[in-house]
Amino acid sequence: MRAAEEKGPQSPDHVEARLAGRLAELRVERGWSLDEVAQQTGVSRSTLSRLEHAQISPTAAVLGKLCGAYGRTMSQLLAEVESEPPQLVRSNRQLVWRDEEAGFTRRSVSPPHPGLKGEILEGFLRPGADIPYDRPPVPGLEQHIWILDGTLQVTVDGDAHELQAGDCLRFRLYGPTRFRNPGPDPVRYTIMIILP
């Protein structure tokens, strides 16, 4: 157990390959074709195929759509591609996922774990980053967003909120959301997610 805690984080290539495999498994488990997933998510069949073969990395928006179709939070999905997480999550073992194109980085500070309903994420958005999510992965998901540095505009079910350092927005999620950094500085925030 101690040795597992001492290891560094998994390489990005390893995580991407396992994520690709898990996305394919989830589709097959449901008996869905690529065309059916494309219809449900609005993501093209060719993109889905390339994702499942680890030829491309998913953007945050695409991953959000797939999580919605498969009924998982993004953290749950990413935790499924990790080896079993230890009870103590050392800083160097926290899975970091980046969407360079969107300017979004997320760190799974306290990843999903069997028997626990909550998780903690750290998010980082560069100035101008704008990430919409069509629907929640799990309806009724409780979220608490605490701003550490910068300004974040969060829209929840059509209600827009501008959050500054120290502010906390909390809600249950049933509809679309949008995370936008109006700039001029990067924004760093934490999200606590609690399953219904």
Image: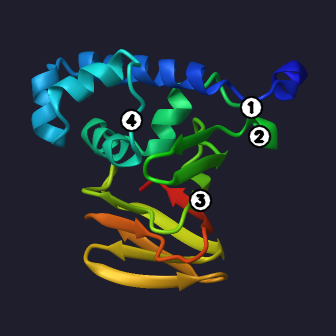
Q: Which of 156 and 127 is in front in this view?
A: 127
Residues at marks 2 and 4 touching, judged by CB atoms closer than 8 Å: no
Q: Position of residue 89 (x, y in %)?
A: 77, 40
Tell me, yes or no, if residue 90 can be seen here.
no
Disc 4 marks which residue? 58
Disc nearer the start of the sequence (3/2): 2
Near-viewer residue (87 or 99):
99
- Spatial CA distance of label 2 from label 1 is 6 Å
Mark drawn on residue 89: 2
Give the quarter of the figure containing the C terminus. bottom left
* 1 or 4: tag closer to the N-terminus: 4
Q: How far apart are marks 3 and 2 (CA)?
A: 20 Å
**Residue at x-position 27% and y-position 73%:** 157
Q: What kind of residue is marked 2?
A: Val
Q: Nearer the viewer, mark 3 or mark 1?
A: 3
- The CA span between labels 2 and 4 is 25 Å
Q: Distance between the residues labelled 4 and 3?
A: 17 Å
Residue drawn at (33%, 65%) of the image: 177
